[in-house]
Structure formats: C-alpha cells, structure tokens
Image (tube, grey):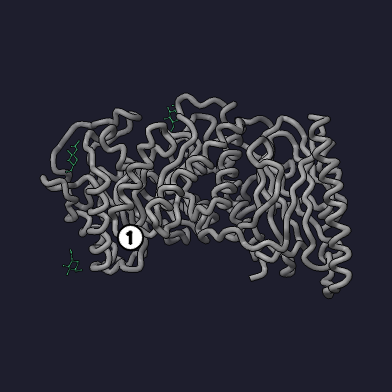
Amino acid sequence: MSYFENNIWSKNEYHTLGRKENDQAGKSIIGSIVVGIFLILLVISLWNIGRHNLSKTYVVIIDTNSNLLHKTSERYLSFGLDSSLLRDMDKFPVKNDTFVNLARYLSPAFVRVGGTSADCIFFNQPVPEVTEKITSPVDAQDISNFTLAGDDYLAVYQFTERAQLRMMFDLNALIRDPDDHWDDTNAKDIINFSKGHSMDIDWQLGNEPNSFRHVFNRPVSAKQLADDYIHLRRLLNQLGYETSFLVGPEVNHIGDNDKAGEKYATEFLKNNENSVDFLTWHQYYLNGREAKVADFINPNVFNRLPIQIKNVQDVIDQTNKNLKMWMSETSTAYGGGAPELSNRFVAGFLWLDKLGYGATAGVDVIVRQSFFGGNYSMIGKDLEPNPDWWVSVMYKQFVSSKVIQLKTPSNFGSIRLYGHCTCPSALISRVPAITVYGVNLNNDFVRISLLYYLKSYPRKNSKSFLYILTADYLQSRDIRLNGEILKLNSDGSLPAFKPVIVDSSQVITLPPFSMAFIIMHGVEHRACET
Ligand SMILES: *[C@@H]1O[C@H](CO)[C@@H](O)[C@H](O)[C@H]1NC(C)=O
Ligand SMILES: *[C@@H]1O[C@H](CO)[C@@H](O)[C@H](O)[C@H]1NC(C)=O
Ligand SMILES: *[C@@H]1O[C@H](CO)[C@@H](O)[C@H](O)[C@H]1NC(C)=O
Ligand SMILES: *[C@@H]1O[C@H](CO)[C@@H](O)[C@H](O)[C@H]1NC(C)=O
C-alpha cells in the first residue's frame, strides 16, 4: 500500500497535455454529471469514514468558479534573526557564503532583526552604565545593554542584500527620558546612518512591550507607546524613510485568559493615529522547556492558532481599523524552541499548518523565528538545513500569494489541507494549476480525494504532481521527499524535486505522519486567472 504504485505516468506524457476549446453545452452537461458523481462519492466516502478507521477517505471539494479568498504579501513566508545574535558578531555568520546561499532560497522575504535584545541596543555608542550581565526573569536570556557597531549593522544589511531579502529592524524602545517619553537620539543615529548607506529598510519599535514589566521591570503603557510610534513615523518621514513600513506593536500573550496582549493592542490602536502599516503580534504554541513530541502532532495544539488569530482580528475590527495583521515573530515553542523537536521533522506539521491556516485567515506576513540560532532554527549551527528549511523552500516554489477556499468536512482534525494558486514559475508550459498542501497527523495511511467543479472543458490527461514529505522517525533531522532524503548538491544548488505523477482524478494516499504538496496541473480556477 503505497502512493508510489500510482506513479504510472512519465513526465513526458504530461507534456503532451492539450488545450481544448471551450464547449458551452458539453461543459454544462459534463459539469452536471461530474457534480453528480462527486456527490455520490462524497456520500460513499463519508460513510466509509464512519465505518473504517483504517481506510479513511477524505473528500476535498474545490469550486473552481469561486473567487480569490485572500492575497497575501509576496513575502508571506518571512523569517527572523534574533537581535541577541548582534551581541556576538563572531558567531553570527552573515558574511559566510553558505549562510547567504541558504537564505537566498527563501527570497522574497522580510528578515526581521528583532527580539528581546532589540531593547538593549545602543547604536555606535557605549552603553551608558557599565553593568554586569543581567538576565530576564522570564526566560533567563541576557538582557544587559550592549553596543551595536555601525560596521556590524552594515554587515547584517549586506547579508540581506546579497540574499535578496528585505531587512526590517527593531529599534530600542526602552531609551526614555525621565517623563517616560521615548528618547529618539540613538534612533536618529541609526536611521541617519542607514540613509547614508542607502539602505532600504522597514522598521519597528520595541519587542513585546506588554511584557516589559516582567522582562525589564520597566512598564511602558500602550498609550505611551502609541505616542512614541507617532513620533517615530514623523522621524522616518523626515529622515528619508517615508515609504518604508513601520509595524507594531509586537505584542505577545494573545489568547491568554487575562487577554493581556489583546488589551494592549486595543489601547495601542485607539491611540496610534494610523502610524503603523500592519498590526503585528507574536505567536507560539508551546513552552520550549516543557513541550513533548506528542504536542507537535496533537490537533488541539494546532487549534490554538485560529483562536489567537480571531482574537487579533477582533481587536482590529473593534477599533475600526483597516489594517492587516502580521505574525511578526512565531514558532512552535518559545524560550528558544524545544530541543530536538522545534528543529526536527516533526516541527514541520505546525509550521506548514500555520502557513496554510494563516493565509486562509487573511494574515499578510508570517515571520518564522528563526532562520539561525536557538533550537527552533531553520538551519543548524553547522549551516546545514533543518527540515523546516526544506518545507519552506518547497512552499516558496509551489505556493503563490493567491489563496483559494477548499471545502472539507472539517479542517481542524488530523488532516488539514489548504489551497493556493500555483506559483507561475512552477507551471508547466503555462498550463494553469492549483496547489493543495497540508499535513496528515495520523499514524496511518489516509486517502484523499480531491474533487473539483469543472470551470471549463476538462483538460485531457490533467495530472497531479505529488511531493510527499516523510521521515524515518518524528525527531529525525533528515526529511524525505517521495522517499529520498533531501540534500543540497555539493555546489549548494537545490536538488531536483522529483514528483510522483498521477491522474488528477485519482485518490491520493498520504503515508502516516506526512506533509504533502499536490500540484494539480491542468486545473483552471477562476481565482488564478489574473
Ligand atoms: C561557512 O561556514 C561553513 C560551515 O560552518 C564552513 O565550512 C565554511 O568554511 C564557511 N565559509 C567561510 C568562507 O567562512
Ligand atoms: C539599559 O539602558 C536603559 C536605557 O538607558 C536603562 O534604562 C537601563 O537601566 C539599562 N539597563 C541596564 C541593565 O543597565
Ligand atoms: C543626518 O546626517 C546628515 C549628514 O549625512 C546631517 O547633515 C544631519 O544633520 C543628520 N541628521 C540627524 C538627525 O542626525
Ligand atoms: C537548545 O536547548 C538546549 C537545552 O535546553 C540548550 O542547552 C541549548 O543551548 C539550546 N541551543 C541553542 C542553540 O539555543
């Protein structure tokens, strides 16, 4: 019982796929017949689900006449580099070619340079008081002030430039005057320095300000921070960054019982006078020190995300703002990630599901914490890819910013699937295609039947290309594509991603604990036309 059995088509046969003229009458008759067959299949399948646990068939219906659900940013899948990396530039390989090469495969993306240490940075100037190392009472990380030299800042920027990425820099919000107003002197230096070096950058001010009291013993009210953002927006406009994004307020603790993050964001939005381009918040499912492998495949953990997104959307709606949200720092587990989990195969499920669900919910950008550093990194200290890097690279290749709606009986259990138009670069001879992707959290084979209403006369031999990701065990650092371990070529180039090719109407079998990208070549969808 294997999906490889289905691979009876050679790629060459697919290339003969012909374009057919539309035939209105034929279209509607065939359309009705097809819909009829779908409904019969649906009934049979639902009946099967009830009867047999071992041979579940999930029926997914794609209405190819439906409109676009959302369009995300072209940089939807973005990533972070924690500001703490700036404390020790010798260990931050921004000048290393391998590092640049790995980052470039994720272009286009934002690189957010931010985090707790952002609020400890003094740019090009010695820290005011010499203090011994101070650590955060929340997660024991270093929170002593430190100096960021202009050269080092420039080196990070040059890395983003070489990797064709866009830097977003998190400014220190904790340099304040005795009246508690933000002191912009040091920020002016860094912004002016940036302009002087013709840097194209976007900006933020501070990190998780609603938690300042706990982390720094230095609370800043949401009203005050809103005033500071207005101030910063004016400053950016004056210093030549009028077209750059400013995003905030970088709140965390969304979805907590006391609604601390939601309250802070609400108060901020009521007072910030449209100074931000996107509402930003931070999202984690788990505590890195406590998380277990079972948490990474438990649908209840996955289902925390929709609630958090809804809470943030409610904040935006209730303050009558016309803003999209960014998850500007997010990963599986906080506190640097869960060792041997957040950087292993099993982490891909939460990551791919977050990308999928976030897009259907209208999230504009998702910034993965982190590309490098910590136990949740996409690449290791050895500058070898971790599984999530591969998942992300495939996402960039196959999934465009155009989100379409799939109709599934439920998408909140152990099968979770999402639909987008396929990236133009992944089309074959410009034949239209849609990409369905998602996860199978079952320790079982699962059958997926992807049915679509026909928008026009069916293309002959329309084919689905399957890219199925598995591992030998959940905590493996290796990831297999259609059975083969993914490895970069020795020159750093990507290996060819070899699909399993099946007929589009064929039921697809997903192996236990797998992720899948299914490119349905030859399926025309109204939302993908323009
Ligand atoms: C980049 O990092 C890799 C892995 O640590 C190392 O093997 C390589 O020598 C480095 N390259 C340069 C130019 O430093
Ligand atoms: C870091 O700098 C800020 C701003 O000047 C200051 O308020 C804070 O006390 C300093 N922190 C430490 C630990 O010295
Ligand atoms: C920015 O730099 C320019 C020279 O490059 C200087 O004239 C100007 O005063 C600086 N502005 C601030 C706010 O530091
Ligand atoms: C990963 O977690 C282990 C155990 O908590 C910790 O000792 C280690 O420093 C972490 N690694 C990184 C790169 O943060």
Residue 406 placement (x, y as % from top left): 68, 51
Q: Residue at x 51, y 40 (%)?
A: 307
Q: What kind of element bears circle 1?
A: loop
Amino acid marked by disc 1: Asn
Q: Residue at x 74, y 41 (%)?
A: 483
Q: Is residue 30 above or below residue 376?
A: below
Seen as rendered, the residue at the extreme left is 178
Q: Nearer the viewer, residue 115 or 32?
A: 32
Q: Is residue 383 above or below residue 498?
A: above
Q: Nearer the viewer, residue 275 or 175?
A: 275
Q: Residue at x 85, y 36 (%)?
A: 1
Residue 116 placement (x, y as % from top left): 32, 40
Q: Nearer the viewer, residue 326 or 372?
A: 326
Residue 154 located left or right of residue 402: left
Image quadrant assignment for residue 153 = bottom left
Residue 303 placement (x, y as % from top left): 56, 37
Residue 270 placement (x, y as % from top left): 31, 52
Q: Is residue 99 above or below residue 15?
A: above
For the C terminus, give its image quadrant: bottom right
Residue 461 located left or right of residue 174: right
Residue 308 located left or right of residue 510: left
Q: Residues within 10 Å of mark 1 (few under 14, many from 20)?
A: some
Q: Which residue is mark 1?
A: 274
